[in-house]
Image (cartoon, coloured by chain):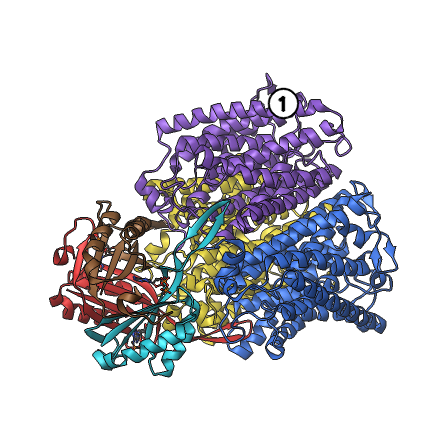
Chain colours: A red, B brown, C cyan, D purple, E yellow, F blue
Amino acid sequence: MKKIEAVIKPFKLDDVKEALNEIGIQGMTVSEVKGYGRQKGHKEIYRGAEYVVDFVPKVKIEIALKSDRVEEAVKIIREAAKTDNIGDGKIFVSPLEKVVRVRTGETDEDAL
Amino acid sequence: MKKIEAVIKPFKLDDVKEALNEIGIQGMTVSEVKGYGRQKGHKEIYRGAEYVVDFVPKVKIEIALKSDRVEEAVKIIREAAKTDNIGDGKIFVSPLEKVVRVRTGETDEDAL
Amino acid sequence: MKKIEAVIKPFKLDDVKEALNEIGIQGMTVSEVKGYGRQKGHKEIYRGAEYVVDFVPKVKIEIALKSDRVEEAVKIIREAAKTDNIGDGKIFVSPLEKVVRVRTGETDEDAL
Amino acid sequence: MNSSDIVFMFVSTSFVMFMIIGLALFYGGLVRARNILSIIAQCMICIGLVTIIWILYGYSLVFGSDVFGFIGNLDFLFLKNVGQDAGPHADNIPHILFCMFQLMFAAITPALITGAFAERMKFKAFILFTFLWSTFVYFPIAHWVWGGGWIGTHGGLDFAGGTVIHINSAVAALAGAIAVGKRKGWPVEQIKPHNLGVTFLGAGILWLGWFGFNSGSALAANGVAMNAFFVTQIAASASALSWMAVEWKIHGKPTVLGLASGAVAGLVAITPASGFVSAFPALLIGLVAGVVCFYAVGLKARFKYDDSLDVVAIHGVGGLWGALATGLFASLEVNPSGADGLFYGNPSLFVIQLADNAAVIVYSMIVSLIIFKIVDLLIGLKVSPEEENAGLDISLHGEKAYN
Amino acid sequence: MNSSDIVFMFVSTSFVMFMIIGLALFYGGLVRARNILSIIAQCMICIGLVTIIWILYGYSLVFGSDVFGFIGNLDFLFLKNVGQDAGPHADNIPHILFCMFQLMFAAITPALITGAFAERMKFKAFILFTFLWSTFVYFPIAHWVWGGGWIGTHGGLDFAGGTVIHINSAVAALAGAIAVGKRKGWPVEQIKPHNLGVTFLGAGILWLGWFGFNSGSALAANGVAMNAFFVTQIAASASALSWMAVEWKIHGKPTVLGLASGAVAGLVAITPASGFVSAFPALLIGLVAGVVCFYAVGLKARFKYDDSLDVVAIHGVGGLWGALATGLFASLEVNPSGADGLFYGNPSLFVIQLADNAAVIVYSMIVSLIIFKIVDLLIGLKVSPEEENAGLDISLHGEKAYN
Amino acid sequence: MNSSDIVFMFVSTSFVMFMIIGLALFYGGLVRARNILSIIAQCMICIGLVTIIWILYGYSLVFGSDVFGFIGNLDFLFLKNVGQDAGPHADNIPHILFCMFQLMFAAITPALITGAFAERMKFKAFILFTFLWSTFVYFPIAHWVWGGGWIGTHGGLDFAGGTVIHINSAVAALAGAIAVGKRKGWPVEQIKPHNLGVTFLGAGILWLGWFGFNSGSALAANGVAMNAFFVTQIAASASALSWMAVEWKIHGKPTVLGLASGAVAGLVAITPASGFVSAFPALLIGLVAGVVCFYAVGLKARFKYDDSLDVVAIHGVGGLWGALATGLFASLEVNPSGADGLFYGNPSLFVIQLADNAAVIVYSMIVSLIIFKIVDLLIGLKVSPEEENAGLDISLHGEKAYN
Ligand SMILES: Nc1ncnc2c1ncn2[C@@H]1O[C@H](COP(=O)(O)OP(=O)(O)O)[C@@H](O)[C@H]1O
Ligand SMILES: Nc1ncnc2c1ncn2[C@@H]1O[C@H](COP(=O)(O)OP(=O)(O)O)[C@@H](O)[C@H]1O
Ligand SMILES: Nc1ncnc2c1ncn2[C@@H]1O[C@H](COP(=O)(O)OP(=O)(O)O)[C@@H](O)[C@H]1O
């Protein structure tokens, strides 16, 4: 099993979720994060003081899935999340050793 | 060393924390996340428009621990987090190569 | 490639970001978390009821980077995040198998 | 008819209406984020529903000609004889204005009760409760005191509703906390206010509105009204400080919630006395209110009833202290149409105050419990554990306050 | 000069000013967190800019001596002849006070419109729009009804601005929703209110302020003013409950947003009628308002215009119902200087109301559309998709509401 | 006694009380989320503590019979001779009402100062400071201007407290910013407002309350009061727009915080002038206020004092401009009991204004610095770095605003 973590633009979340659903991937965990990278931040003004804000709001999606589905999932996420602008985000894949479903105690692929 | 990530129902956080404490696991990092899975979302109504909200509030616990404690910890978390309802959550185990305590510079098991 | 996750004190975020920038590490993803560990929580009072709050606000930084830069990065983070008080936080290193840049589809080290 | 008094009562009435908004915020900030809308919904029901039943029959039951000292008759049913001309209870302002001022009191009283069973009561049950409780508890008791009933006529003093509103609602609150039962997790889990800024704003609006509440109860822009205005400010200030002081001493830190709670306690305590006592008694009433209400908050832990937002401690204990203090400090010099209290040589007033309030407490407790029982049988009082976990906002109202 | 009336109008004017703050919160809570400041900025422009143009020439265009029934002359340009003495439109209060009360109406009206194109309109465009729309739409129409123009003189009734303010702003809102175009994602994406507590607070302030809005329109602290006060409370309450009831029936849950929307719908509907109808007609007006406005919210989905915060459904449909209901229920018994309506034996009033409002709708629609067109040509109406995604607060104002 | 004036002063007093709530929100939204409660606590101390010392001796020190032009005597100690009858300073309203109106001014002034040392001052130190500063700075200066002291008697004009309240508090704010020292991280770190919606609400409440503040200073519902009402609206609007304009030009975007700050700057600037100048001078006063206060915000960066919420720039510079503008634009036509200013042929008034304000600035600066020194020695002014990091809400009050 693998874990995919994708950091994407917030307003792309629904598209990515739909796209994954279509290929039968229906579990995921989502969190709000702030990203820092090449994408330029914006300027903020408070009583004349100008601040450059480097951190940009992003959404992180975590998906545990069978190893053989990783490639497809990555592709789908990329397609759905893309706007062709800097800051579209990144996808990370890392190893996952075990998954347990709390409710039933099922493990690994049964737990997905 | 391993990392356990457990996605559970928010109101179970205290129970899980207590249960882990009892077996001597006292460090963890917690974040608020939204889960998407089999658990049905709820309906929301705003000026007559009905929305089905798929994302359900969850809490994610991250615990770094020695490899030989993983099994026990997973069991304890499962027991404490269980309500026997869909959406009780999942536990993920992944490899961890190194841990450093910022304050002292101790590493790996000493840093836990 | 590796993933560094560092849990630090919130007001150290800017220092850590600057320090990493200086050694040329410019991508990261940040989230607000709550930490539980040796650091004592604080007391809160609401209408005479006293609560001990164990969870302390922390910030989690995630950085994907080339394996050979891990050591340096960990050192830099440690130095920047240190206040020599309990609760300064921890740094975790874990394996990363793949990185994809959503915008371009570049992978792995090109994607960082 | 006096056009200054019209303006005065217009403002006072508006302020009391605004208090209900303030109360919703005061309470709404104190619950968890997933229940704030349920508080607001209940407060809006109090405004909406009580307005309707008030014009249908409530006003008549309270202010219609007295029947056996217990209730008003049906003279004003469906606002019959209630128009732009002055009515029998105030010859200086339009009857409809008097009716509307009194309406606001009727509307805020059940809203006060909601704090006791916050975060767990069924909305449908609350609506039925509000209807029954207004009809069978508030209307009679308001009549007793202000409408020509037995308390007002035999000399009991309650300037702006210490008995009718605060004690009465607190007794019902106690009944409700017991009848509805505890929140899941209480008292073990940490159940903390989710937004104290909102609570402070609510307290601020309450403070402002209370000027209309107390001063307006003079029904005219005269010296007594301004006395009420003045002593309201003094008692609230004193009570905020004394609550803070005792909390600081005992818990080591002075909290904003303490300051706000103290202010409300002082406002409650001065309510029955505001038209009868002068500044320094008011100072004392406030100082004592902050301390006794602070300690009274501890009662629920001792006696294990989950009065979630401390209606009993603040409105009950504060109101009772105020009612008794009226018996101690009332002075004919402040208000010639009032009475002298114990410290001005008239111990009988104190006895009357004691007796009246005891009667109200007993009546309100019994009838409130019966009403809760009836509602429980018909609808059930408490939401399911799942609904409670998910929060009433989603469960009962299909909404989230924060997105 | 009557000093009670001065106080009354001082309070009423202050309350209406406070309504604009309330409106900003009401709307601000309904948009997404990244757009709340853009709403607030627009409301502040309405206060600031309209105040300036009002004292320069707006007041004169509305209340200067009538020219062909269409517009006021320049008698009061730059506040000439407008001082502390009474003016021609109210002999009981200082001219500047009358001028300021009317200013608040002029200021709130464009603020109401903002709900229609919330979350996407350029700020610069909004400023120009406000300037043009006030000048070419609001000032003439206000003159027609209140300044001596054709509607007021031939007998049309609009006590506190149902036609001038609510219908007028809703028509412009419809024009704006069409001219500016839809929000990205609408109606497919879930675009939810970000803070319903703030929306409730706004609604509460609106409710309070509306007392000044409607009662103050009597321009004196008299029986008619208090009638307006009373029926305002009744209609708002009834409408909150009826909206809730129909929503409960259809969607299975009673929402706080529904209660608040219903209250506002009732307040809108009673506005033109408040000085002319008595309590039970007001009850009916409120009950109907809650239901028809609830259903009217569905129109935007059917006709595919993104009236983001339902200005058309609430202010347009509610206002129209109120204007027609005035033609049905107005009664000389309530207000001898008004007229009898259809149900009091005078069908002609109903016809007049119909005709007047039709004229206002046509005029407002045409001129509003032209103004939007001009602004579009000069500046452009809508922000870029990137700005919309990032949120107007950051894009247009360089600020975030929440940090 | 005049019952209209009673109502008017009741409303005005209530509005000023509400301003303190508004101020707490205005400031509270501007600090970081972990310090909002500390702001609120300080504002509540200002209400509570000042109320108590005011009735004990403060009122007497300000309004007791003049002693050497410097301070009031003890005639009114413990409210002796202060009752429901009219007092020496206003024969149209009850003495207690006059006393309470003036109390609100005394209470809001130290609350204004808190903005300067927000996010870092010890609570205990603040309490002691408030006590000392009210006694030794506010009470004397208020006496000088309004209580029969040297400024009022020799002809200096300060209608509603530009000198007594705004300049005075700003000078103390400067002293405080210096004495308490900078916040950790300032000016390098980004220290941003945590909730601009709350700040806007606060500004809105301030705007509303300012109507009572300025108009009420006429002490009667007359033409001068309504003039103050009118020009307050104009100056605030103009200043909001001019601040926005200059900010837009310089920083490229018009912010809501700029609009709100501009409005407050305009309100401050018109305060001393409001009973003496007419509409167009008010327009000018507002337009200038927005611009000079905008630039004045930059002073703290230049001179390196951490006046966190810009009390000096807004209340000091705005207040000074208003005081001088009074010397320029005051007109006997507006207020026969005032004076003509420079532009109405009387240059001496301008000189008097200059001199008076210089005296107040010097006195306030010296005594404020001494008081800060004393408090520093007795208690210490600043929290520890750890407490500052954790936030004052947790450190000093054991609470979190948001859970
Ligand atoms: N090395 C990294 N480690 C972790 N997250 C990263 C890294 N680099 C970028 N990110 C995340 O990806 C987001 C997008 O990256 P950015 O460089 O702005 O644009 P792009 O994805 O187009 O290259 C960032 O906002 C950040 O959240
Ligand atoms: N494949 C997955 N990857 C990551 N998180 C998942 C995955 N599947 C489920 N989750 C998380 O687990 C939570 C519970 O899953 P769900 O399918 O609703 O119920 P259950 O745990 O009973 O099977 C989800 O809300 C989500 O946060
Ligand atoms: N075993 C663990 N797994 C995950 N996170 C941990 C673990 N132990 C500690 N942490 C995180 O590190 C933070 C600091 O740890 P703590 O024990 O308080 O102090 P120190 O870092 O000085 O040892 C905690 O707040 C928590 O977020």
**Quarter holding residue F148:** bottom right
Q: Residue furthest left?
A: A68
Residue D327 screen position, x and y as percent:
68, 28
Question: Where is F46 relative to D98, above or below?
Answer: below
x 26%, y 66%: residue: B109
| Image quarter (top left, top right, bottom left or bottom right) of the N terminus of chain C | bottom left
Residue E365 image position (x, y, % from top left): 47, 61
Image quarter hosting the C terminus of chain C: bottom left
Residue located beneath label 1 in the image: D151
- Where residue E188 sits, quadrant-wise, is bottom left
Residue type at mark 1 is Ile
Q: Residues within 10 Å of mark 1 (few under 14, many from 20)?
A: many
In the rendered image, the residue lying farthest to the right is F68
Residue D64 in view (yes/no): no
- Foreground pick, C2 / E166: C2
Q: Who's the residue at 28% across and 77% down the image? A: A84
> Looking at the image, which residue is at 74% across and 28% down?
D340
